[in-house]
Image: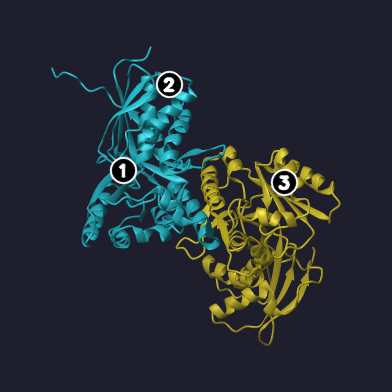
Chain colours: A yellow, B cyan
Amino acid sequence: MSPDHPVTAFAPATIGNVICGFDVFGLAIESPGDTVTVRHIAGSGLRISSIRGDGGKLPLDPAANAATISISALLQGTRQTVAMEVALEKGLPLSGGMGGSAASAVAAVVAADRLLETKLPQDELLSYAVEGERAAAGGAHLDNVAPALFGGLLLVRPGSSHEVVRLPVPSGMSVALLHPSVEMSTKAGRHAIGTTVPLDAAVAQWGNTAAFVHALHTNDWDLLADALEDRVAEPHRANGIPGFREVREAALSAGAVGCGISGAGPSIVAICRDTEGAAHVGAIMLSAYEGGLRPMASLHLSPVSHSGARVLPPLALSAS
Amino acid sequence: MSPDHPVTAFAPATIGNVICGFDVFGLAIESPGDTVTVRHIAGSGLRISSIRGDGGKLPLDPAANAATISISALLQGTRQTVAMEVALEKGLPLSGGMGGSAASAVAAVVAADRLLETKLPQDELLSYAVEGERAAAGGAHLDNVAPALFGGLLLVRPGSSHEVVRLPVPSGMSVALLHPSVEMSTKAGRHAIGTTVPLDAAVAQWGNTAAFVHALHTNDWDLLADALEDRVAEPHRANGIPGFREVREAALSAGAVGCGISGAGPSIVAICRDTEGAAHVGAIMLSAYEGGLRPMASLHLSPVSHSGARVLPPLALSAS
């Protein structure tokens, strides 16, 4: 029997591409993230009771929201017909390059799985969350959804027999994430890249992804720095991001191991050796950003998180 | 004072690309290889006294041979003007996809370095050998030259601050190498690939190179098998290689971890877990190849070699 009380789950922000691995690397940070609460209701179908933190921009139509699309896929996949009410708390910006739609989708399936007591295997939860991400981001990309669900730093290769591979994370690895408050559509960002890659850039990119993985295994921060270069997306996307070049240069001068676009942007991520480094680099990134006449920005600092989405303990309804 | 007696060095065959890493991976095998003998002579300049094993196809012009071009670069780089005679023994086929020009270039600089007693650092020897390879193969590619010199399985990223990175080799890893006796020019092979890569193939390729390196570090043969796929060169080059598809299918059915084109072809390489596996797979590849009406072929079996080029001990001139 399913519980009558609501279930709330959290899924964290994720950094798609991790600079050098367009569409194949993703990592989870500890916070911020999105929170989804689901509860049984009478009647049939899904309904969204509330969305907070989106500035009123997201529609309440369950057919147009990554969270409810994912739950719908789960219900179809498990052949259940139940009525459910969904409340969404967006801790992540819309179209911010922080994996917001993936976090909503993942938190939704994790919450629904608990509410329904289906105890689905993780890879099945992943496949349902991908449906929500597909609708939001225009393709079945795993580089945000998988780390939002599993945590850590992942290699994703959709369609292969090893779709998700967990990579080692050098001790301390942390990020500074600067989010200029402009929206960049993932779909439009993909369009800008085109459908082909120059051979020399492509060769450099697959040399970099190989070097990146070797550096993770050997704790070689110098090699990591050398590998954290984006020859594929950055040339097309950097011009659209306010202050990108100044912020990147400031981050590298301040000791960041690497700096580039997070996902499709506009967020700018710096990879650092530890939390102190991330705090130092982040402050300098913000300062470089604010040196220009630019939209507001927010800064997030976090270690790479080894845990991904999780059900949150129920709120105490009465204080003692 | 330089020795008066001749110096002979050997450099092994190498497998460029290692199937999934066009231009970035290369590995050395133990044999066959090329052998270069150098000796001081009176007068000035370089001369080629003999070339054996090439079927008379290579010119004796020192300006047109990878071995002498490399030695010439070494002499210029170290500002020496000495006269030297070079004898080349080709154990590797011309334009065979087995790194023949790289082996000649590398054996030449290793022999010259010993003859001249210059004791140059390995990376300097590499840079001179690259000049010979550039002339022969039409570009400064490291994926054959570096493993011919250093041995092992290498990641090469020309122009980066970490040009050559040694990757771990799972214990036992061996290759079966089938060489159909047709010539394929590296320059022409590169031309066939074109100057751009479709984005989806490129993403798959850099996912594969990342997975390949992770699999090497974790001894994960299943992941290795999944990663050993060539989305970039094989589609353009496979049709030109006699029996490629039948041989590849036979190798995989016989238990090869992966099978693809060695370098620019026409050699076909199968990666196997151990020498017994390579012997079994190789026999079946040869049988599949000979099932068709095709040019002669030769088969080589070898573990991945951890040692690369080396000076050979002097021949005993008189038996006791």
The residue furthest right is A293
Mark 1: few/some/many CA within 10 Å (<14, 14-19, 20+): many
Residue B176 at least partly seen:
yes
Residue B301, position in %: x, y?
26, 46
B288 to B263, vertically: above or below = below
Between residues A107 and B79, which one lies in front from this camera angle? B79
A4 to B275, vertically: above or below = below
Q: CA distance from mark 1 to mark 3?
A: 45 Å
- Residue annotated with mark 1: B303
Which quarter of the picture shows residue A252?
Answer: top right
Residue B219, position in %: x, y?
41, 48
Between residues B10 and A50, which one lies in front from this camera angle? B10
Report helix, strand or loop for mark 3: helix
Of callouts 2 and 1, the N-terminal one = 2
Between residues B176 and A84, which one lies in front from this camera angle? B176
Mark 3: few/some/many CA within 10 Å (<14, 14-19, 20+): many
- Residue annotated with mark 2: B119
Q: Are marks 1 and 3 in contact (CB under 8 Å)?
A: no
- Residue annotated with mark 3: A248
Seen at 35% across and 31% down, the residue is B107
Chain letter of mark 3 equals A
Mark 2: few/some/many CA within 10 Å (<14, 14-19, 20+): few
What kind of residue is marked 1?
Pro
Residue B207, position in %: x, y?
51, 56
